[in-house]
Image: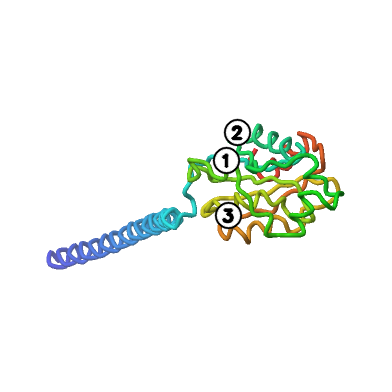
Amino acid sequence: MKKIIVLFLGVCMLISLVSCGKQDDASGTDTNATTQEGTENASGQETVDGAKDDASGSGENTGTGKTLVVYFSATGNTKEVADYIAAETGADMLELQPVDAYSSDDLNWRDDDSRVVYEHENPEARVMELVESTVSDWESYDTVFIGYPIWWGIAAWPVDAFIAANDFTGKTVIPFCTSSTSGLGESGELLEEAAGTGNWLEGMRFSSNASKETVQSWLDGLGVS
């Protein structure tokens, strides 16, 4: 009888040890699962960080968040819109001024003998020097607004000199124009083609004497105000 009791106790101890071993295995599995989940999260974060590093390395995000409003204004309408944009966004400004400035007679497109008509009919005459075509801290700007009046369905050509003088890599470029009757047309697309670099957004056409509220509403839609 004593041997039977001892044997019975031995079996009980063995069963107890097997049960404890199974519990340890289950606990180990949970620990491994938690560790694996943590690894996946860490890996995901590393992927995001790596993408940011790649973008920075390729020059696609080289600025420091500053905004620049560049504009050419023949009669003051484009300047007014540019002023509204700069005030709303806290941007710096650069007015494009030809060294050989336009007079009111030069800008009379109804006069077949005017300068602007001659330049329209002779594209080689549109190449001109600007008083300023660059800014000293160009690389610090992430966003560049470019404004101009519409001449014969395209951007007024003094803007072309600014486009040619600058590299828009890594910058978001937003064209805007003013016109009494004409639309934006392909003006923005042609400037983008000439620039060859940059992330160009669809532009906006404003009528002459556009209100501050109209400009602000557009900026709100862009999410830059």
Marks 1 and 2, how far apart at CA: 7 Å
Please give the name of the residue rendered at 26% of the width and 60% of the height, measured from the top-left corner. 20
- Asked whether the viewer can see residue 13, the reply is yes
Horizontal side of 24 relative to 108 (left or right) equals: left
Q: CA distance from mark 3 to mark 1?
A: 20 Å
Q: Nearer the viewer, residue 85 or 178?
A: 178
Looking at the image, is mark 3 or mark 1 earlier in the sequence? 1
The furthest residue to the front:
113
The residue identified by callout 3 is 164
Callout 2 touching callout 3 (CB < 8 Å): no
Q: In x, y percent, where is residue 50?
A: 40, 57
Amino acid tagged 1? Thr
Q: CA distance from mark 2 to mark 3?
A: 26 Å
Image x and y of residue 32, in percent: 33, 60
Q: Residues within 10 Å of mark 1 (few under 14, many from 20)?
A: many
**Residue type (three-letter) at the residue carrying disc 2:** Gly
Q: Tag 2, which secondary structure?
A: loop
- Report the residue marked by disc 1: 67
Which residue was labeled with disc 2?
90
Badge 1 marks a residue whose secondary structure is: strand
Q: Helix, strand, or loop for circle 3?
A: helix
Check disc 3 and give the amino acid type: Ala
Please tell me which of labels 1 and 2 falls first in the chain: 1
Residue drawn 65% across the image and 41% down it:
97
